[in-house]
């Protein structure tokens, strides 16, 4: 039997040999189409090549593309398990030409591959073409030798493809396989076309027109090819099956489900096994591509898929977590073709197990309450919407599960009543928000959140993506557009920009489109989890509904990531060095530095800082993987995770682990954190502590840098060392001894200078002593003598003259400092305080104080020092 893996390899090898670039599957979250929840066809990753917005090094390609259809326009969720060919997850094989070859080559490749390499009987194949595409019909006749009756003309849009309301478009040609007259159904275009006899296996799109507004079409200068062949459908044909779930990959998962639940794969629970098999694939691949369960956007669709599978596990009688045990079976089937699957297997297993544990509790409680409510209803009476809302709002029972349970009983739901109850709750929340004082000034964000929902953050796995502008705020009010030069706040339906929280600063970058450029200078969270981009329109006009390319300043983000991850390592190193009393009291993770405040009663010594710095750098050199897990807060704490200061945690948390563990912990650092981090600790580069200081009682602050900033700090230190060595003319190793000797020399010289100043101040001829009003006065301007020496000098002068007054002024540092001393026998006639105040007024000072025998004052005008001495003379003479 030809396996699914063989089919995939044969397809890709054929086109590789035909000169095509074999392109790996893109992630399921599209980065180039904000209108799509998930990649739902093989051409989505190449969309910008078809429109000419992007150029690559190749003009022809082939791929096996992962696809999910479970939300939005393309939603197969409710049919999965009940039909032979509906899936949420499927693989699309395709070959593409971007202006290289066209219809003839595409048809020749398809016919050769199907009939020669895969060995399909030619007489079992037939094709459809668009009714006016005679060129394609003629090529099928000439290349494949198909008779006219096997070339069916279809006049509907089934055979005309459009990228959107406007843009590239063109006719298509579908290839069908005939299972033979033993299977009911007619050929395409016939009244019985929905039967299973004729199965479409490959669609060739001939992209040859550009459609403008009003349906006007012009020929594309470089027509292109886009094809798609569903691997599951094709495997069913090659493996002789009529049901995709009987093919090798899906059958292996069905059997794994049956064996794990001890039930018959083809018995009463057949549909449940099929649902579990399909949903396991979509769940695992979505998690591997960075989608995690949540209550908004893609995360909500993932959670809905998971819970649908879990309901079917419940039907199998499984009351304990079950589906997570099937992940290894999936990895065995598809892990070689998609290496992201085994890489993410631990995360997939943990996420599934956590969701199953929560779901089991919620399901038992919700179904019991729902049964109680339904028991009160008449046979055909729908469930009241207010009751459904109570189940949702109070007990966490999702509306879609309520609807599923009611559908099984043939009962409806009062949707209008549910929406009315939801609207009433929102009105109450809005009123509460408006009454919160300063928060009322930001009510615009609450209104936008109410209308738009939460923003979807893509930045854990990507730093650029296309996005739709769903909210614009100018001058504090909602707007439909913004002009060049205007400051603007923008909400996108999805964004790679991280909004400031948990100590990590918000991202900066650009939003761009044809003729438009918005410079984003900050990203903030408003109204809880609405991500708002603050910036300025640099060129063009920004309009509501516009598609923009959001691109984070990745060099800045990389620096922030390095500092944030280093903060986690620093936290653990401090706890291991200083003790478990160390906890985070605040942090800043910026592109140029990190700041980390901790509970610590005493300063951290230089020796301790050196131990911490070495420990962090040792973890960096390990270059271990930084892992992220999703779990409950309680489970995270049990595993040794540290909860970060200021963070609010819900039912689920992101747990970031890094560094090699030991006997006590699975990793060096385990913390609850919603920020962005490096992929491996080695990406931090280097770590350097710059400063340690106190910021409050019992709180110490560590400031540090990583990466290029750390190297710059080390280089700056080396430059200073070299400069200091040059100045003192000593080798770096001799600097401590040389500086100690210089300091000792300075102290000795200061003592000598002070003694000389004292001798100069107190010595001199008798003519330097004045007689003013019968009182001896020593009035001297001492220039740069230190102000702190004035009192001792005044004492010395008074001792030398016996009875008298000493008035001394220093002009050091550009200010006048004054001391007046009065001998004890004269304090009854002249008060030192009165004299010094008179002197202070002369130099622009006010007041002065001291004792009657010794007082001091000062003023800003050092140039009037002599006037201060004259003021003392005048006061003595009065």
Image (spheres, rainbow, N blue to C red):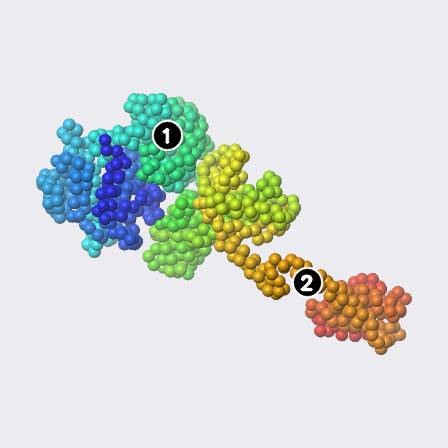
Element class at badge 2:
helix
Left or right relative to 395: residue 41 = left
Image quadrant containing the N terminus: top left
Please say if 701 is above or below 377: below
In this rendering, would 320 be left or right of 130? right
Kindly identify which numbered label has been placed on residue 152.
none
Question: Residue 307 location in percent, x, y?
Answer: 38, 32
Query: Which of 745 and 191 lies nearest the eye of the viewer?
Result: 745
Residue in the picture at 35% in, 34% down: 331
Alpha carbon distance from label 1 to label 2: 75 Å
Tell me which label, 1 or 2, sits earlier in the chain: 1
Q: Which residue carries the number 1 mark?
A: 326
What residue does disc 2 label? 742
Residue 277 point in image, percent of width and height: 32, 31
In the rendered view, tell whether residue 36 sits above or below residue 792: above
Neighbor class of circle 2 (other Cα within 10 Å; few <14, some 14-19, many 20+) is few
* Residue 758, image x, y percentages: 79, 68
Q: Residue at x 71, y 61 (%)?
A: 744
Tell me if I can see residue 541 in this picture.
no
Which residue occupies 42% across, 35% down? 346
Residue situated in front as seen by the camera: 451 or 606:
606
Q: From the top left corner, tell me how far across and down residue 811 is, in percent.
A: 72, 70
Q: Is residue 134 visible?
A: yes
- Above or below residue 445? Residue 282 is above
């Amino acid at each position: 039997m030809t396996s699914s893996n063989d089919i995939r390899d044969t397809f890709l090898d054929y086109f590789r040999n035909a000169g095509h670039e074999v392109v790996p599957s893109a992630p399921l979250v599209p980065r180039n189409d904000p209108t799509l929840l998930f990649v739902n066809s093989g051409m989505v990753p190449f969309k910008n090549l078809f429109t000419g917005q992007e150029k690559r090094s190749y003009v022809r390609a082939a791929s096996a593309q992962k696809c999910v259809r479970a939300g939005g326009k393309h939603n197969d969720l409710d049919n999965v398990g009940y039909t032979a060919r509906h899936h949420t997850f499927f693989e699309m094989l395709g070959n593409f030409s971007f202006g290289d070859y066209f219809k003839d080559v595409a048809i020749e490749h398809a016919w050769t591959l199907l009939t020669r390499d895969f060995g399909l009987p030619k007489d079992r194949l037939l094709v459809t073409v668009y009714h006016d595409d005679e060129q394609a019909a003629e090529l099928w006749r000439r290349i494949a030798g198909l008779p006219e009756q096997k070339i069916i003309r279809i006049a509907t849009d089934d055979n005309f493809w459009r990228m959107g309301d406007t843009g590239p478009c063109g006719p298509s040609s579908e290839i069908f396989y005939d299972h033979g007259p033993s299977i009911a159904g007619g050929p395409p275009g016939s009244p019985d076309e929905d039967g299973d006899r004729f199965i479409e296996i490959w669609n060739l799109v001939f992209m040859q027109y550009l459609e403008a507004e009003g349906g006007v079409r012009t020929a594309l200068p470089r027509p292109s090819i886009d094809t798609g062949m569903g691997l599951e459908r094709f495997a069913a044909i090659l493996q002789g099956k009529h049901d995709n779930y009987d093919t090798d990959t899906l059958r292996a998962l069905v059997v794994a489900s049956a064996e794990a639940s001890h039930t018959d794969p083809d018995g009463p629970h057949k549909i449940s096994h099929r649902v579990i098999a399909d949903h396991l694939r979509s769940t695992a691949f979505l998690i591997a591509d960075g989608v995690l369960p949540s209550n908004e956007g893609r995360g909500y669709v993932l959670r809905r898929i998971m819970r649908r599978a879990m309901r079917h596990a419940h039907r199998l009688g499984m009351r304990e977590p079950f589906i997570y045990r099937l992940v290894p079976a999936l990895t065995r089937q598809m892990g070689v073709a998609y290496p992201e699957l085994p890489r993410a297997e631990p995360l997939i297993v943990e996420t599934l197990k956590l969701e199953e544990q929560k779901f089991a509790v919620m399901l038992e409680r919700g179904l019991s309450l729902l049964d109680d409510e339904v028991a009160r209803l008449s046979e055909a009476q729908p469930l009241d919407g207010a009751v459904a809302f109570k189940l949702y709002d109070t007990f966490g029972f999702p509306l879609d599960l309520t609807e599923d349970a009611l559908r099984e009983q043939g009962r409806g739901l009062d949707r209008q009543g549910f929406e009315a109850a939801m609207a009433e709750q929102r009105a109450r929340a809005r009123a509460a928000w408006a009454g919160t004082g300063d928060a009322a000034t930001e009510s615009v964000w609450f209104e936008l959140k109410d209308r738009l929902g939460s923003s979807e953050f893509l930045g854990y796995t990507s730093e650029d993506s296309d996005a739709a502008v769903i909210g614009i705020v100018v001058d504090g009010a909602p707007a439909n557009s913004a002009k060049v030069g205007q400051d603007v706040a923008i909400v996108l339906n999805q964004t790679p920009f991280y909004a400031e929280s948990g100590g990590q600063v918000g991202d900066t970058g650009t939003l761009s489109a044809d003729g438009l450029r918005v410079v984003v200078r900050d990203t903030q969270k408003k109204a809880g989890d609405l991500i708002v981009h603050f910036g300025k329109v640099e060129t063009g006009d920004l309009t509501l509904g516009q598609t923009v390319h959001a691109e984070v300043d990745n060099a800045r983000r990389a620096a922030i990531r390095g500092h944030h991850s280093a903060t986690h390592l620093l936290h653990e190193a401090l706890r291991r060095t200083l003790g478990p009393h160390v906890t985070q009291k605040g942090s800043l993770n910026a592109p140029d530095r990190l700041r980390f405040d901790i509970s610590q009663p005493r300063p951290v010594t230089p020796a301790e800082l050196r131990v911490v710095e070495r420990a962090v750098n040792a973890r960096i050199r390990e270059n271990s993987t930084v892992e992220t897990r999703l779990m409950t807060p309680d489970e995270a704490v049990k595993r040794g995770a540290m909860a970060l200061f200021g963070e609010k945690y819900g039912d689920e948390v992101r747990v970031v682990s890094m560094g090699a563990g030991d006997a006590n912990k699975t990793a060096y650092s385990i913390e609850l954190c919603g920020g962005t981090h490096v992929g491996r600790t080695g990406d931090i580069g280097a770590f350097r502590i710059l400063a340690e200081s106190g910021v409050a009682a019992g709180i110490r602050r560590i400031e540090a840098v990583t990466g290029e900033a750390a190297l710059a700090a080390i280089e700056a230190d080396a430059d200073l060392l070299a400069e200091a060595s040059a100045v003192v003319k000593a080798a770096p190793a001799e600097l401590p001894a040389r500086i100690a000797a210089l300091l000792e020399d300075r102290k000795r010289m200061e003592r000598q200078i002070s003694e000389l100043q004292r001798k100069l101040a107190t010595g001199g001829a008798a003519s330097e002593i004045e007689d003013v009003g019968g009182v001896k006065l020593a009035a001297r301007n001492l220039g740069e003598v230190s102000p702190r020496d004035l009192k001792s000098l005044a004492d010395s002068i008074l001792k030398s003259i016996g009875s008298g007054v000493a008035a001394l002024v220093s002009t050091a540092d550009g200010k006048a400092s004054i001391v007046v001393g009065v001998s004890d026998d004269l304090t009854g006639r002249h008060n030192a305080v009165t004299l010094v105040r008179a002197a202070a007024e002369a130099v622009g000072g006010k007041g002065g104080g001291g004792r009657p025998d010794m007082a001091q004052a000062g003023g800003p005008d050092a140039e009037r020092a002599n006037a201060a001495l004259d003021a003392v003379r005048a006061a003595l003479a009065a």
